[in-house]
Image: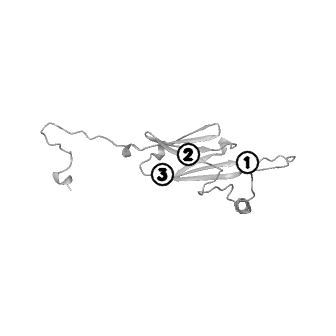
Amino acid sequence: MLTFDPFREFDRLAGQLLGNGAAVPGGTTLAMPMDLYRSGEHFVVHCDLAGVDPGSVQIDVDNRVLTIRAERSPRTDDDVQWVRRERPTGTFERRLTLADGLDADRITATWQDGVLTLTIPVAEAAKPRRIEISTSGDRPVVEGSDAAAISPA
């Protein structure tokens, strides 16, 4: 059984008029839904961009902010009489702030079946590493430094 909820319909119409597109609870839009996960030494972002020309997609990194911008053009046939139009058109943008431990210079992007995939590697400096212990009784010497340069805290 379907019931008419005038408040939900009003929210939907207000969102369209104010440029929010198809707003959903939680503050995201249906225009560019995104998944983000870590897989080993990389973070992976998948953005659904069905109906978007891959040539219209722009990906920029500026001051550790990753911006994904895409445009879905409206259908411009003159003889079309719309019955229902739910797929938003226009320019869509997502911004992600990258942590210091990510290598923004090595981000890669691929496109397959309307899904944009970004792979963001973890920076070498942020990866865990093992420090070897010397077992010879000799004290390690750091060239060009004196004993006061490294002292216990």
Q: How many marks?
A: 3
Determine whether 107 is above or below 89 in the image.
above
Between the C-alphas of marks 3 and 2, the distance is: 15 Å
The residue carrying pointer 3 sits among few (fewer than 14), some (14 to 19) or many (20 or more) residues within 10 Å by Cα, namely: some
Left or right side of 135 for 8: right
Task: Give the color scheme: rainbow, by chain, secondary structure or one colour.
Answer: one colour
Secondary structure beneath dot 3 equals loop
Give coordinates of residue 2: x percent, y percent. 75, 53
> Circle 2 sits on which residue?
35
Determine whether 41 is above or below 32 in the image.
above
Q: Given the image, on which type of amino acid does mark 2 rest?
A: Asp
Q: Are marks 1 and 2 in contact (CB under 8 Å)?
A: no
Please identify, in this view, whether the residue under mark 3 or under mark 2 is nearer the observer.
2
Write down the quadrant of residue 24 in the picture: bottom right
The residue carrying pointer 2 sits among few (fewer than 14), some (14 to 19) or many (20 or more) residues within 10 Å by Cα, namely: few
Give coordinates of residue 142: x percent, y percent. 20, 45
Residue displayed at 48% across by 51% down: 98
Between the C-alphas of marks 1 and 2, the distance is: 23 Å
Give coordinates of residue 20: x percent, y percent. 67, 59
Label number found at residue 98 = 3
Q: Given the image, on which type of amino acid does mark 1 rest?
A: Ser
Write down the quadrant of residue 4 in the picture: bottom right
Label number found at residue 73 = 1
Left or right side of 81 for 126: left
Residue extending farthest left: 137
Residue displayed at 64% across by 36% down: 113
Residue extending farthest right: 79
Q: Nearer the viewer, residue 152 or 16?
A: 16
Determine whether 29 is above or below 54 in the image.
below
